[in-house]
Image (cartoon, rainbow, N blue to C red):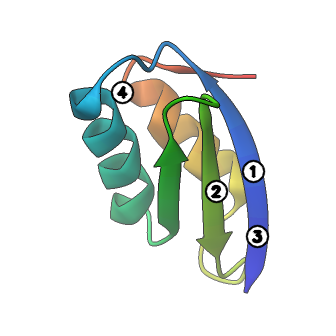
Amino acid sequence: MQTATLNVEGMSCNHCVKAVEGAVQEVGAQGTVDLNAKTVDISYDEAAVSLDAIKSAIEEQGYDVV
């Protein structure tokens, strides 16, 4: 398993947390959002999903991964 921490701009509430964590889960990874730090800690199997795919899934929800 690989891990990464992504900075995500635009999150401001629990709905945002659920949207980001749900998007990460849909592509086959696990994510935990820290709303105060504006980050999401990701655990993923790089044989199953790429970090770019995870970033794209978050961005499709309307957030910016920086």
The location of residue 37, given as percent across then percent down, is 64, 31
Residue ID for mark 1: 5
Q: Residues within 10 Å of mark 2 (few under 14, many from 20)?
A: some
Q: Amino acid at mark 4?
A: Gln
The location of residue 47, given as percent across then percent down, is 70, 84
Q: Residues within 10 Å of mark 1 (few under 14, many from 20)?
A: few
Separation of residues labelled 4 and 2 (CA atoms): 17 Å
Query: Looking at the image, which residue is at 49% across and 12% down?
Result: 10
Of labels 3 and 4, earlier in sequence is 3
Query: Looking at the image, which residue is at 63% across and 74% down?
Result: 44
Of labels 1 and 2, earlier in sequence is 1
Mark whose residue sits in front, 3 or 4: 3
Identify the image quadrant of the C terminus: top right
Disc 1 to disc 2: CB gap under 8 Å: yes
Residue 32 badge: none
Name the residue furthest left: 15
Query: Looking at the image, which residue is at 36% across and 27% down?
Result: 61
Residue ID for mark 2: 41
Identify the image quadrant of the N terminus: bottom right
Residue ID for mark 3: 3
